[in-house]
């Protein structure tokens, strides 16, 4: 037997239960991993609340963890028992002492990256990798806007953008978070609680606005983000922290300058073992070179996942949070 977090109904953090379960033996092309550290992410709250539907209830939770392979199924060829691995994709169930998942979803973890670092950085780091290197290829000199720059994804984006030679303007909710974002490499910050974001972007870019806006906030910032884009600029809506963007009239894209919009997901970019490992290797190289620091600010026992999610949703966390089995 092992222990995991599961939920039998949708709702707030209080629906999460810490229970015993019988681990699934690995089937064909599957691997069972003994988790050493587990990542906490906003997407976990979407599954819990019902914004995203899990396959069935009761359901496990979480899509990111790092650990050691303890069993392999038939046909597994890339990994073996004892390998250090990490993952940032489903199936749901990473909030667990052990987790069985497809071999293709796992990447090999170099000895230079700790389990906690990997669990804290896989989902956020691979997200930043595809955002800055693939969805829009950020170049030296680009002035880009990134919402929630002091959060988990934003903290990595500030560093990665700086390493690419780009000027990242980060939105934040307080002077403390502005200071943090600048320390991590943001070129400028805008405190949206007391400043007009679109107006400040206009000022900071000498009236040119940005070629790309990265928005993981969602409903609350949708229109503001569009107003920060130059003609034919790209709006990258990659998250729903304030709720999903809905009821969009495409005509607004014409009105605001023939804008482009994309709603990417990590699963579309990390869509096979080869692509996922290549993205992870790029991420690990950035960490190994010292250009990307993994900032773990909060650690909770796995049994306190509900408390950790409540803190995350209330925006009382900074940097990354990990759960320890």
Image (cartoon, helix red, strand yellow):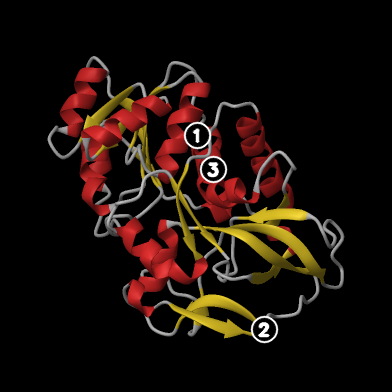
Q: Is 92 placed left or right of 77 in the picture?
A: left
Q: Is 149 placed left or right of 321 in the picture?
A: left
Residue located beneath label 1 in the image: 132
Compute the Cα span from label 1 to label 2.
42 Å
The kind of secondary structure element at disc 2 is loop
Depicted 104 relative to depicted 114: above or below? below
- Label 1 close to label 2 by CB (< 8 Å): no
Work out whether residue 276 can be spotted.
yes
The quadrant of the image that shows the N terminus is bottom right
Residue located beneath label 2 in the image: 1
Residue 208 x, y percent position in the rendering: 27, 19
Residue located beneath label 3 in the image: 125
The kind of secondary structure element at disc 1 is helix
Depicted 23 relative to depicted 290: above or below? below
Mark 3 Cα-neighbour bin, 10 Å: few <14, some 14–19, many ≥20: many
Q: Which is nearer the N-term, disc 3 or disc 1?
A: 3
Work out whether residue 55 can be spotted.
no
Compute the Cα span from label 3 to label 1.
11 Å
Mark 1 Cα-neighbour bin, 10 Å: few <14, some 14–19, many ≥20: some
Depicted 202 relative to depicted 259: above or below? above
């Amino acid at each position: 037997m092992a222990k995991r977090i599961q939920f039998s109904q949708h709702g707030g953090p209080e629906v999460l239960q810490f229970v015993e379960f019988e681990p699934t033996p690995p089937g064909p092309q599957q691997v069972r991993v003994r988790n050493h550290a587990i990542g906490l992410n906003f997407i976990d709250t979407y599954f819990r609340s019902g914004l995203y539907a899990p396959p069935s209830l009761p359901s496990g939770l979480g899509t990111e963890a790092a650990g050691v392979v303890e069993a392999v199924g038939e046909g597994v060829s890339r990994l073996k028992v004892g390998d250090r691995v990490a993952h940032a994709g489903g199936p749901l169930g990473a909030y667990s002492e052990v987790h069985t998942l497809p071999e293709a979803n796992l990447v090999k973890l170099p000895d230079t990256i700790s389990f906690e670092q990997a669990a804290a950085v896989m989902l956020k780091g691979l997200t930043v990798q595809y955002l800055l290197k693939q969805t829009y290829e950020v170049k030296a000199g680009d002035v880009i806007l990134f919402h929630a720059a002091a959060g988990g994804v934003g903290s990595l984006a500030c560093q990665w953008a700086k390493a690419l030679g780009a000027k990242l303007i980060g939105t934040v909710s307080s002077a403390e978070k502005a200071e943090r974002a600048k320390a991590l490499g943001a070129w400028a910050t805008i405190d949206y609680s007391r400043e007009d974001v679109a107006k400040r972007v206009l000022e900071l870019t000498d009236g040119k606005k940005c070629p790309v806006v990265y928005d993981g906030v969602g409903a609350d910032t949708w229109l503001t983000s569009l107003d920060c884009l130059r003609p034919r600029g790209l709006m990258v809506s990659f998250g729903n922290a304030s709720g999903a963007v809905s009821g969009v009239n495409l005509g607004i894209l014409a009105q605001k300058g023939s804008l482009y919009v994309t709603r990417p997901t990590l699963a579309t970019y990390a869509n096979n073992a080869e692509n996922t490992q290549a993205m992870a290797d790029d991420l690990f190289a950035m960490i190994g070179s010292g250009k990307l620091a993994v900032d773990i600010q909060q650690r909770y026992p796995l049994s306190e996942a509900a408390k950790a999610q409540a803190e995350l949703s209330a925006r009382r966390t900074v940097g990354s949070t990990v759960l320890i089995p």
